[in-house]
Amino acid sequence: MDVEEVVVDCRRDGLRSSLAVASVQELAAQGLEMVPERYIKDEIGHGNDHLSGIVVPLIDMSKLLNDDDSELQKLHFACKDWGAFHLINHGVPSELVRNIRKQTQEFFNLPLQEKKRLAQQPGDQEGYGHAFVTSEDQKLDWSDMMFLRTLPTHRRRTTFWPQLLPSFRETLDDYSENMRELTVQLMKFMAKALDVEDEQLDQNYVDGNYDVKLSYYPSCPQPERVLGLLPHADVSAIAFLLEVGDTPGLQALKDGHWIDIQPMDGAIVVNLGQVMEVTTNGIYKALDHRVVVNSLKERLSVGIFGYPNPSAMIGPAKSIINSGTPPLYKTITNDEYFHLFLNRKMIDDPFIDNLKLKA
């Protein structure tokens, strides 16, 4: 989901204005044999630090709802040790999942001129385009996206929502609401696993902000020289990733190695962001992740990003600090949090370091 009228909301929701660049989907359709220089990222590397055979934890939501203590401990471990997990039996209607997959594919299958009607506008990240392009010489990800603010509904831009097909609007609305409800449920279970009682871990997300990012990663003639998405940890609290197909590409950083998160039928990938790492005083980890591409198949995904209520303070939960654990992070306003994010000196430096208290 890091992304929110335009100047204030952009700061509050972690967005920065993005320059217009060519559609990667259209570039790939030209049958290129070589990737344009602006997409080459040889310095990042793909091979030596990749491990296979390791799987992300699997959490069963139905067991959590039935007060299964062992499943709660599995959730606690997944959040502490990984910052991510596959979630099954999550309660999202299967028809809704089918619809959002189908309609996301249909959106990216539209002619370029149709998609350009929803292009990002100057000073905003919302719309169809490319994320976080801030200079003409910046290296680019091998991907296109459609980014929309979804909840609360008053944040929705009238520039974009009326232009979506009515069925797609309804699907995005229903799916976002399901993800909001799932966020609140998971936050309650995380609070229980941490043995804390604090509105920072559930109530702040009842009326929090939620965004959707539809992503398209075309096949690439030189996949070893590009990335679909650069390594990063989300600035949100939580993110839900739904694979549209069965093409792998998402990788998690675990103990210094990149691990494939394979698509799993019936599962949604849940990953924690930096708000959650701060809220839990470092007990739970924000997941560092990236996306790789391949030479044969496209990959599409639907991401929902959840943020606390904009009026909430961002800092270690009081109930964690009151237990005698010293705070490791500052407590700041929502606006201060995103101001720090947007104005950090080195874009590649871990943002979380800006929030740590000095020893």
Image: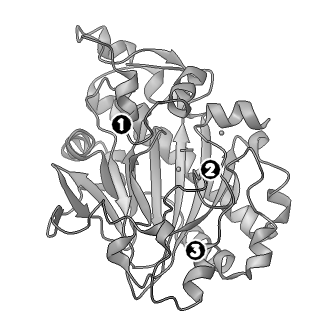
Q: CA distance from mark 3 to mark 1?
A: 27 Å
Do residues under tags 3 and 2 come within 8 Å of each other at their CB atoms? no
Q: Secondary structure at mark 3?
A: helix
Q: Residue at x 32, y 75 (%)?
A: 224
Image coordinates for residue 81, horizontal then vertical, percent:
20, 43
Tell me which amino acid carries mark 1: Pro
The residue that mark 2 highlights is: 177
Number of numbered discs overlaid on the protein picture: 3
Image coordinates for residue 106, horizontal then vertical, percent:
66, 80
Q: CA distance from mark 3 to mark 2?
A: 30 Å
Tell me which amino acid carries mark 3: Val
Q: Residue at x 41, y 40 (%)?
A: 273
The residue that mark 3 highlights is: 24
Residue 60 visible in this rendered orientation of the protein = no
Which numbered mark, 3 or 2, is in the foreground of this view?
Answer: 3
Judged left or right of residue 115, residue 137 is left
Judged left or right of residue 225, residue 344 is right
Q: Residue at x 56, y 45 (%)?
A: 180
Which numbered mark, 1 or 2, is in the foreground of this view?
Answer: 1
In the figure, 259 relative to 284: above or below? below
Do residues under tags 1 and 2 come within 8 Å of each other at their CB atoms? no
Tell me which amino acid carries mark 2: Glu
Q: Secondary structure at mark 2?
A: helix
Q: Earlier in the sequence, mark 1 or mark 2?
A: 2
